[in-house]
């Protein structure tokens, strides 16, 4: 594996741990795809640093458990904004 890929994987992992961001938010910050972020933290990172990989896994599992709530709030806001534009 190339050195810059390993560095990126560790940087992405540290960012996720520090900010508790989602894969999508992290991808925007680093200018890479969601697939790249996911591959970095689930496949590459455990080979580089298993301890950090476990911490990232905890954050991502928490985000996954909460995603249905965020989706519901987003839908609620969407319809609330549509209603206010009609009035």
Image (spheres, rainbow, N blue to C red):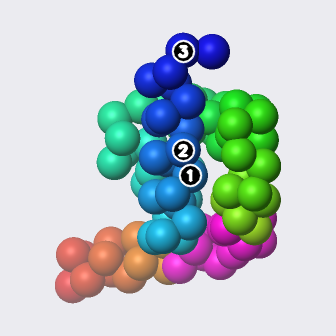
The answer, for residue 64, to whether it is visible in the render is no
Residue topped by disc 1 = 13
Q: Secondary structure at mark 3?
A: loop
Question: In percent of the image, x 54 and y 15: which residue is there?
Answer: 2
Q: Residues within 10 Å of mark 1 (few under 14, many from 20)?
A: many
**Residue 85, position in %: x, y?**
21, 75
Q: Find the distance from the CA under tag 1 to the CA under tag 3.
A: 17 Å
**Residue 45, position in %: x, y?**
69, 40
Magenta-colored stretch includes residue 68: yes
The answer, for residue 13, to whether it is visible in the render is yes
Q: Quadrant of the C terminus?
A: bottom left
Asked if the residues shown at circle 2 and circle 1 are in contact, with their CB atoms under 8 angstroms apart, the answer is: yes
Instruction: First in sequence, mark 2 or 3: give its number.
Output: 3
Q: Find the distance from the CA under tag 2 to the CA under tag 1.
A: 5 Å
Q: Which residues are magenta?
A: 59-73
| Vertical arrangement, residue 25 with respect to residue 43, above or below | below
Question: Can you tell which mark lies on residue 2?
Answer: 3
Residue 28 is left or right of residue 63, and the answer is: left
Q: Secondary structure at mark 1?
A: helix
Residue topped by disc 2 = 10
Magenta-colored stretch includes residue 18: no
Question: In percent of the image, x 71 and y 64: which residue is there?
Answer: 55
Q: Find the distance from the CA under tag 2 to the CA under tag 3.
A: 13 Å
**Residue 53, position in %: x, y?**
73, 52
Q: Secondary structure at mark 2?
A: helix
Question: In percent of the image, x 53 and y 79: which residue is there?
Answer: 73
């Amino acid at each position: 594996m190339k050195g810059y890929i390993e560095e990126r994987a560790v940087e992405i992992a540290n960012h996720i741990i520090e900010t508790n961001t989602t894969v999508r938010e992290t991808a925007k910050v680093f200018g890479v795809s969601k697939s790249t972020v996911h591959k970095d933290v689930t496949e590459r990172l455990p080979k580089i640093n298993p301890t950090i990989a476990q911490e990232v896994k905890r954050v991502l599992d928490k985000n996954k458990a909460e995603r249905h709530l965020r989706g519901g709030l987003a839908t609620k806001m969407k319809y609330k904004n549509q209603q206010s534009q009609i009035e």
